[in-house]
Amino acid sequence: MRKVRLPVVITQDEDGYYLAEVPVLRSCFTQGKTREEVLSNIKEVIHLCLESMAKEGTPIPEKYTLEQVEIAV
């Protein structure tokens, strides 16, 4: 089994829950009450997403860039 590194974006909602998503994997997101919980949850979800992608024959994205943009609000 090979290891892959994937970007995870973590935010906190107005109720204090942490939300995690993997922007390079479609529909790969979860939530948790703490950062530790959400990180544990997202690892499980990533495994499920990668299993599904393997069954579909979809390759794991290996090249991507992370950018931040600034806008006036």
Image (cartoon, rainbow, N blue to C red):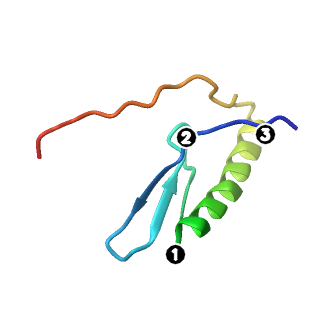
Mark toward the start of the polypeptide (1 vs 3): 1
Circle 3 residue: 55
State the quadrant of the N terminus. top right
Q: Position of residue 37 (x, y in %)?
A: 60, 69
Relative to residue 27, is residue 17 depicted above or below? below
Q: In this orientation, which residue lies closer to the viewer: 45 or 3?
A: 3
| Residue in the foreground of this view, choosing between 71 and 45 | 71
Could you say which disc has been placed on residue 7 in the image? 2
Determine whether the residue tagged by mark 1 lies in a helix, strand or loop.
Answer: loop
On the image, the x and y values in percent for residue 59 come to 70, 28
Q: Secondary structure at mark 3?
A: helix
Q: Say left or right for 36 vs 43.
A: left
Residue at 66%, 37% (x, y): give it. Answer: 5
Residue plotted at (58% across, 40% down): 25
Q: Which residue is under mark 1?
A: 33
Hey, which residue is sitting farthest left in the picture? 73
Label 2 vs label 1: CA separation? 20 Å
Name the kind of residue labelled 1 in the image: Lys
> Residue at horizontal 53%, vertical 65%?
35
Q: Which label's residue is closer to the chain start, 2 or 1?
A: 2
Tell which tag, 1 or 3, sits nearer the viewer.
1
Where disc 2 sits, the SS reads: loop
| Inter-mark Cα distance, 2 to 3 | 22 Å
Percent position of residue 13, x then y: 36, 67
Callout 3, which amino acid?
Lys
